[in-house]
């Protein structure tokens, strides 16, 4: 979150991620920013960083994605609490820190 809305950039290691067939960068109706990685394989393991910036400041947070060796194990969905919009200018901040994740090969990570 931030006021004005932050500019969001996602990185895999030092490489900036753009929307393409592999990655989808979204902002949902609750103003939550999402990175979706399609058909995860061993090449997708590593550190992902979200960088948020606006005229009041900049912040970033990183997490690692691991490949799940158990193909039958499914991760439980994560719910995100709603936020109330701020009226004053506010530097970007993470409401919920991204965390390390494990996903089965061929599945999507969010």
Image (cartoon, rainbow, N blue to C red):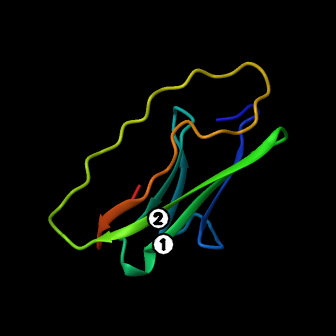
86 vs 79: above or below: above
Which numbered disc covers residue 62? none
Quarter of the figure with the C terminus: bottom left
52 vs 70: above or below: above
| Rendered location of residue 80, percent (x, y) | 43, 35
Residue 106, picture quadrant? bottom left
The answer to whether 88 appears left or right of 66 in the picture is: right
- At numbered mark 1, what does the secondary structure look like: helix, strand or loop? strand
Quarter of the figure with the N terminus: top right
3D distance between C-alphas at marks 2 and 1 = 5 Å
Which residue is drawn at the image coordinates 54% and 68% (left, top)? 20
Which numbered disc covers residue 64? 2
Q: Which residue in the structure is indicated by mark 1?
A: 46
Badge 2, how many Cα within 10 Å: few under 14, some, many 20+?
Answer: some
The answer to whether the residues at label 2 and label 1 have Cβ atoms under 8 Å apart is yes
Q: Residue most toward the right? A: 55
Q: Is residue 44 visible?
A: yes
73 vs 84: above or below: below
The answer to whether 55 appears left or right of 76 in the picture is: right
The answer to whether 7 appears left or right of 99 in the picture is: right
2 vs 71: above or below: above
């Amino acid at each position: 979150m931030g006021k004005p809305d932050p500019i969001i950039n996602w990185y895999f290691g030092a490489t900036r991620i753009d929307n393409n067939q592999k990655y989808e960068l979204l902002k949902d109706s609750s103003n939550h920013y999402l990175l979706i990685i399609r058909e995860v394989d061993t090449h997708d393991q590593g550190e992902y960083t979200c960088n948020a910036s606006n005229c009041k400041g900049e912040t970033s947070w990183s997490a690692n994605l691991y490949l799940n060796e158990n193909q039958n194990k499914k991760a439980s969905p994560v719910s995100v609490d709603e936020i109330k919009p701020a009226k004053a200018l506010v530097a970007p901040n993470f409401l919920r820190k991204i965390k390390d994740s494990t996903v089965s090969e061929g599945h999507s990570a969010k």
